[in-house]
């Protein structure tokens, strides 16, 4: 567990208390430590963790330490994702009423805008080549109820739509020839343990054959696939406690295995790097 630094402050309160018979001045000093459990959308590289706190992107050494704020412009940031080499972060920025794709060096600097479409986007992943960013958008879906996948060069330009009619969250295989994805999602819904027709499954789509395979196929909610090596990790509430936990699908054995067993809190927005996975549960970050 990575314990990120809390924010401390010194509060000095002067209060004057009057009574009928006596007037006196009492000065009270107290030092308090704020428990800032509001870390969101974490990601991890070989050396750093990034996350969103108070609408800004922060980075911290993977082994712990003092987090540094990477961005502080007006507007909000979300879904930061490290590039494969760990030198750049792609993220969503909403600076003028629309959510677009931006990049920023991990050492800091001015964000570079990548997309300019009037529809909003959600940054999902980097292509394994490190030159393209995968994002989801409803810009050409014809309806506002679902998204599709697009690839765009990290420097901008025209986005290329992937051949998936509906796609919400996804992750490329290490060779970039396949993609694990969900055709729908409930991660932004405000009720839990749903069992119904819009509960998402994880699919693997083969770019060469244009065929897809359902690798979860259950009544639970299976979300946020993360491909690393021979395994597709994902979030699911199919366990006995019906809490969102981390599961893994082995592409060789075709078996699904539960890896974490949180009982009191759901895991939110896990993300995987070359060597590690990071996620939030109960307001804390876990590595």
Image: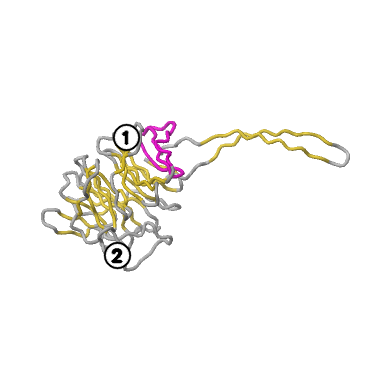
Q: Who is closer to the viewer here, 26 or 90?
A: 90
**Dot 2 lies on which element?**
loop
Give me the disc on residue 143.
2
Distance, label 2 to label 1, CA atoms, is: 35 Å
Above or below, 168 relative to 35: below
Q: Quadrant location of residue 244?
A: bottom left
Of 42 and 260, the residue lying toward us: 42
Which sits in the foreground, 190 or 277?
A: 190
Q: Position of residue 188 (x, y in %)?
A: 39, 57
The residue depicted at 29 percent of the width and 49 percent of the height is 116
Where residue 21 sits, quadrant-wise, is top right
Query: Magenta segment range?
Result: 48-73
Q: Earlier in the sequence, mark 2 or mark 1?
A: 1
Residue lying furthest left in this view? 209
Residue 10, placed above or below residue 77: above
Residue extending farthest to the right is: 21
Q: Residues within 10 Å of mark 1 (few under 14, many from 20)?
A: some
**Does dot 1 land on a helix, a strand or a loop?**
strand
Residue 287 at x, y percent in the picture: 36, 40
> Residue 39, image x and y in percent?
43, 44
Residue 122 in the figure: left or right of residue 211: right
């Amino acid at each position: 567990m990575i314990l990120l630094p809390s924010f401390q402050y010194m509060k000095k309160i002067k209060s004057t208390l009057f009574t009928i018979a006596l007037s006196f001045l009492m000065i009270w000093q107290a030092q308090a430590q704020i428990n800032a459990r509001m870390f969101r959308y974490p990601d991890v590289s070989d050396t750093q963790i990034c996350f969103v706190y108070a609408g800004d992107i922060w980075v911290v050494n993977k082994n712990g330490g003092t987090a540094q704020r990477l961005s502080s412009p007006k507007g909000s940031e979300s879904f930061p994702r490290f590039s494969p080499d760990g030198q750049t972060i792609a993220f969503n920025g909403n600076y003028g009423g629309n959510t677009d794709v931006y990049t920023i060096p991990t050492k800091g600097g001015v964000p570079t805008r990548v997309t300019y479409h009037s529809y909003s986007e959600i940054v999902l992943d980097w292509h394994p080549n490190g030159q393209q960013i995968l994002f989801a958008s409803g810009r050409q879906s014809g309806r506002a109820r679902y998204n599709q996948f697009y690839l765009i060069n990290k420097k901008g330009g025209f986005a290329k739509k992937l051949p998936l009619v509906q796609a919400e969250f996804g992750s490329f295989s290490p060779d970039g020839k396949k993609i694990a994805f969900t055709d729908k999602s409930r991660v932004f819904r405000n009720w839990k343990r749903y069992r119904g027709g819009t509960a998402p499954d994880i699919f693997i789509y083969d770019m060469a054959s244009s065929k897809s395979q359902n690798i979860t196929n259950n009544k639970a909610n299976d979300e946020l696939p993360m491909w690393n090596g021979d395994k597709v990790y994902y979030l699911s509430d199919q366990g006995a406690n019906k809490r969102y936990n981390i599961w893994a699908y082995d592409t060789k054995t075709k078996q699904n295995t539960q890896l974490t067993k949180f009982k009191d809190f759901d895991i939110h927005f896990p993300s995987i790097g070359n060597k590690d996975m990071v996620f939030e549960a109960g307001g804390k970050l876990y590595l």
